[in-house]
Image (cartoon, rainbow, N blue to C red):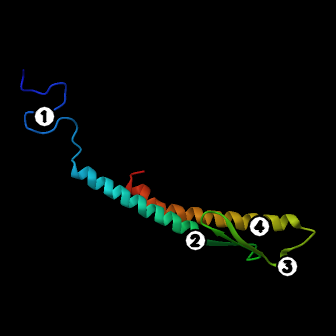
Amino acid sequence: MSSGMRGGFGKSRGGQQGGMNFGGGNMQQLMKQAQKMQNEMQKEQAELEETSFEATSGGGAVKIIMKGDKTLESIEIKPEVVDPEDVEMLQDLIIAAFNDAANKIDEATHEKMDKYTQALGM
């Protein structure tokens, strides 16, 4: 029999295990870093979900408070903007405040999560 490797398995002549070598400890360290990053990211996502974001429209006539998970927490409407003859204006003010709150959540989320996507080269 030859002293080489049979079938690509076993030990090579140098005594090293056959197959791919990913650096052993380096791979383990990389996995630890990835796990740590994942845990930090999940923690920040949970914090964002519990954060309240406030938005207004119509110079403060409509105020919305929304959680980071985009659930509506409260809405305040000043009585002077409630005009039975102009319901559409009130609807527009509510939509504008709601969208502003949602945009603030998206911006905060991107700001916090960008460091993770940049670290991953995304």
Quarter of the figure with residue 4: top left
| Tag 2–tag 3 contact (CB < 8 Å) | no
Callout 1: SS: loop
Q: Amino acid at mark 2?
A: Thr
Mark in front: 4 vs 2: 2
- Closer to the chain start, of discs 2 and 3, is 2
Q: Which residue is mark 4?
A: 94
| Tag 2–tag 1 contact (CB < 8 Å) | no
Q: Nearer the viewer, residue 44 or 24?
A: 24
In the image, is residue 120 above or below residue 111?
above
Q: Which residue is mark 3?
A: 80
* Image disc number at residue 11: 1
- Closer to the chain start, of discs 4 and 1, is 1
Q: Is residue 47 left or right of residue 66?
A: left
Q: Amino acid at mark 1?
A: Lys
Residue at the spot x=39%, y=53% of the render?
Answer: 120
- Closer to the chain start, of discs 1 and 3, is 1
Q: CA distance from mark 4 to mark 1?
A: 71 Å
Q: Is residue 109 left or right of residue 81?
A: left
Task: Residue 77: give x, y in percent of width and height.
Answer: 79, 75
* Image disc number at residue 90: none
Classify mark 1: residues with Cα within 10 Å, few (<14), some (14-19) or many (20+): some
Residue at the spot x=19%, y=28% of the render?
Answer: 8
Q: CA distance from mark 2 to mark 3?
A: 30 Å
Q: Amino acid at mark 4?
A: Ile
Q: Residue furthest top?
A: 1
Q: Which residue is mark 2?
A: 51
